[in-house]
Image (tube, rainbow, N blue to C red):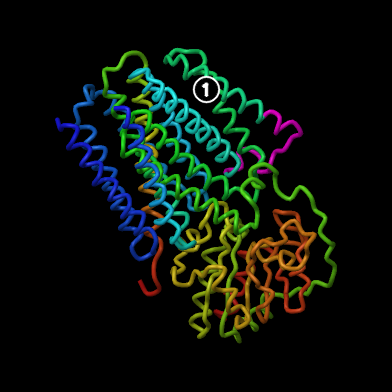
Amino acid sequence: MELAPVYLAFILMLAIFLGFELISKVPATLHTPLMSGANAISGIAIVGALLAAGSKMPGLAPILGAVAVTFATVNVVGGYLVTDRMLGMFKKKGD
Amino acid sequence: MIDNVAVNLAYIVAAALFVFGLKMLGSPATARRGNALSAAGMLIAVVVTLLSKGILEWHWIAVAMLVGAVIGALAARLVAMTSMPEMVALFNGTGGAASLLVGWAALYGDGSTFTAITVTLSVLIGGVTLSGSILAWGKLSEVLGSRAVVFGAQRFVNALILVGLLAAGVLFVMQPAPDSPVFFVILGLALLLGVMAVLPIGGADMPVVISLLNSYSGLAACAAGFAINNNILIVSGSLVGAAGIILTNIMCKAMNRSLANVLFSGFGAVATASKVEGEVKPINAEDAYLILEAASSVTFVPGYGMAVAQAQHAVHELGELLEGNGCEVTFAIHPVAGRMPGHMNVLLAEASVPYDQLVEMEDINRRMESVDVAVVIGANDVVNPAARQDEGSPIYGMPIINVDHARTVFVLKRSMASGFAGVDNPLFFGDNTRMLFGDAKASIMGMVAQFKE
């Protein structure tokens, strides 16, 4: 159990490097959809929110979780849909 | 009910889909599928979480998800493309709020020191993202003034907030409790810090702020992941954090300013640039048409002014007519044009401009000498040659689109006023520059009408 934070930090380090590699090649044309698409991914907090909202933890925890679920769902649903709407407008000549 | 191992295996699949999705967002041909892939990853993560043993209570979840989905879907459908920056700012804010609350709820779980530290971090980053995003939304939608607000004691106040946060953080970690008053002090200071961080930034610097808040929303999710010991939050959060930092860096480079300079010092506070004087050569739509009609390559350089004038559809029409006339048409877009990274590209794509006509600054500068006519629409600072020539200029050193190297330059402008940075633009007095005064949309329509005759 004491090592768990260290493993998590390992994952963090690798994911950050991966993120830099993935995104540094995106052309300027797509910066806005990239940002809103990445923003939708940050709605992954929904997983934590669901776990808190569905738990039988004491006190405010389930309520805080439920409010968090609402916010995160707005982020996820809105983020993916608006990105899709934008990308649908990018057409090649003759399409 | 699925056990923990299965849940975590599914999280690995979700993370892989996020990675593929982001990779495919790198090319216009695959971007839409990439986004769908990433959404599928999210769906998997949500579904397995709902089926896991951790979920004992359904009712509130169902209500919360329904409400969130309706709000999100409506917002995504209804938002105008010109308002995309403030929409993304708000979405950043909701992400930050969610991470903040997840961290807060984790306090009711276990009271270990590690949890206390990570909860403090997620409340701090999430809080800064939330209040900073709301202020950024206010500035971008012009509900609040979009100017940078700088006051004398700002640094002192910021330092006080940071010291307060540090002290409260230490106190809280020593005695963590969900109802500790110290916790609410941290929450309040984090929200205040977000406001103070965005307050001194305004105008042309807004693309940097959105990129940075985007990064924070990822880092907040990452911190919440540490608080609840959850891999998928850490991986996805750090991917987003890295993306935001890269965009922030690109924006800063495109303005030739350091991040610290953008964050702490307002824009264009000093204007010691040498005054530019000279004769302006106006032109009317008929003469402009004659020159365009004879041109074999034309580049449009749009700025935010084009969006304000709602001229993008008219510009696209003019572009099509020129192409029909055998002319090569391109759109040169500066990285910081618009209110968020890539904003101009989206607006042009909405006006059905094909993406193969959208050219980046470096590409067009390499062949600017062979461009017959460069048409500047609602852009000013990003085409200001003072950035190359005048060391006293506040924008000196900023990379610009060298329209002055084209054979002829048309500048569409309402009147002779300076741009966002309040800098005089020697381009307007250039030998090869012709000023087409008036509303940008009306001017373009004028040229379109000439073509159709």
From which residue to which does the magenta span run? Answer: B141-157
Q: Residue at x 60, y 48 (%)?
A: B206
Crowd class of label 1 (few under 14; some 14 to 19; many from 20; radius 10 Å): many
Return the residue found at the far left.
B1
Q: Position of residue B192 (x, y in %)?
A: 59, 28
On the rendered structure, is B438 left or right of B350? Answer: right
Q: Position of residue B314 (x, y in %)?
A: 54, 67
Q: Nearer the viewer, residue B370 or B301?
A: B370
Image height check: is B183 above or below B199?
above
Quarter of the image for residue B112 reads top left
Q: Identify residue for label 1.
A: B169
Q: Nearer the viewer, residue B318 or B427?
A: B427
Q: Nearer the viewer, residue B81 or B288?
A: B81
Q: Residue at x 30, y 48 (%)?
A: B39
Quarter of the image for residue B453 reads bottom right
Q: Residue at x 31, y 39 (%)?
A: B232
- How many numbered marks, from 0 up? 1
Residue B174 in sight from this viewpoint: yes
**Amino acid type indicated by mark 1:** Gly
Magenta segment's dominant SS is loop
Reply yes or no: does residue B142 show up in magenta.
yes
Reply yes or no: does residue B103 show up in magenta.
no
Residue B74 in sight from this viewpoint: no
On the rendered structure, is B180 left or right of B310? Answer: left
On the rendered structure, is B414 left or right of B309? Answer: right
Position of the N terminus of chain A, as image quadrant, is top left
Image height check: is B70 above or below B381?
above
On the rendered structure, is B428 left or right of B255? Answer: right
Q: Nearer the viewer, residue B152 or B325?
A: B152
